[in-house]
Amino acid sequence: MTSLMKTTFGEYIRLLRTEKGLTLTQLAAKLQLDSANLSKIENGRRDFDEKRLPLLAEIFELNFDELRNEFITDQLGKKIYETNCTKQLLKVAEEKAEYRRTLSKNIQKEKAL
C-alpha cells in the first residue's frame, strides 16, 4: 500500500468501499457505525476512530501497520493545516520526537540491566 498523499483518510475509506462494491450502509454495519456517521467520515466532517483501524484492515484485507501509518499521517496533516504550522515549528516538533525516541531507548536499556 502506498500513501495516498492527495486524499484524506475519509476519502481513502470511500475509495476502498467503492472498489469492493460495498454500500455505505453495508460498510457502516461491518464497522459497527451508522451510515450517517460513516458518510461524515468519508466527507471529512468527522474523524475516523483509531480503535476501529484493526477492523477496517480486516474488512479490506490490508496490512494494519500501513493502514495505521496512513491514518496517522492524515491526522498529522490535518493538525498542521488547522494550526497553520510553520516549518520552524515542525522542525522543533521533530526534534522533540527524536528526544522522546532517545529517552525511550535509554529507559529500555536501563530495564535490560
Image (cartoon, rainbow, N blue to C red):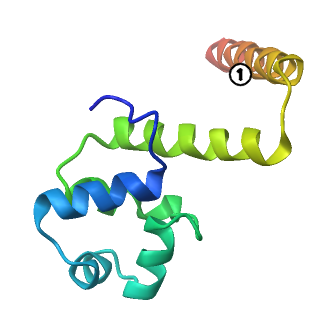
| Quadrant of the image containing the C terminus | top right
In this rendering, position of residue 110 left or right of residue 17: right
Q: Is residue 30 above or below residue 62?
A: below
Residue at the (32%, 79%) spot, across then down: 28
Q: Residues within 10 Å of mark 1 (few under 14, many from 20)?
A: few
Identify the image quadrant of residue 86: top right
Residue 27 drawn at (x, y percent): 25, 75
Q: Nearer the viewer, residue 14 or 53?
A: 14
Left or right of 56 on screen, residue 92:
right
The residue depicted at 28 percent of the width and 78 percent of the height is: 24
Q: How many marks?
A: 1
Quadrant location of residue 13? bottom left
Quadrant housing the N terminus: top left
Q: Report the residue that reaches farthest toward the left.
A: 21
Residue sitting at 19 percent across and 55 percent down?
A: 60
Q: In the shown orientation, is residue 65 left or right of residue 69?
A: left
Residue located at (20% from left, 78% from top): 23
Question: Depth check: 8 or 97 in front?
Answer: 8
Compared to residue 81, the image places residue 22 above or below, namely: below
Q: Is residue 24 above or below residue 65?
A: below
Q: Indicate the amino acid at tag 1.
A: Ser
Q: Quadrant of residue 68?
A: top left
Disc 1 on helix, strand or loop?
Answer: helix
The image shows residue 54 at horizontal and vertical percentages of 35, 56
Q: Position of residue 29 (x, y in %)?
A: 28, 84
- Residue 11: x percent and y percent? 40, 56
Q: Is residue 99 left or right of residue 65?
A: right
The residue indicated by pointer 1 is 104
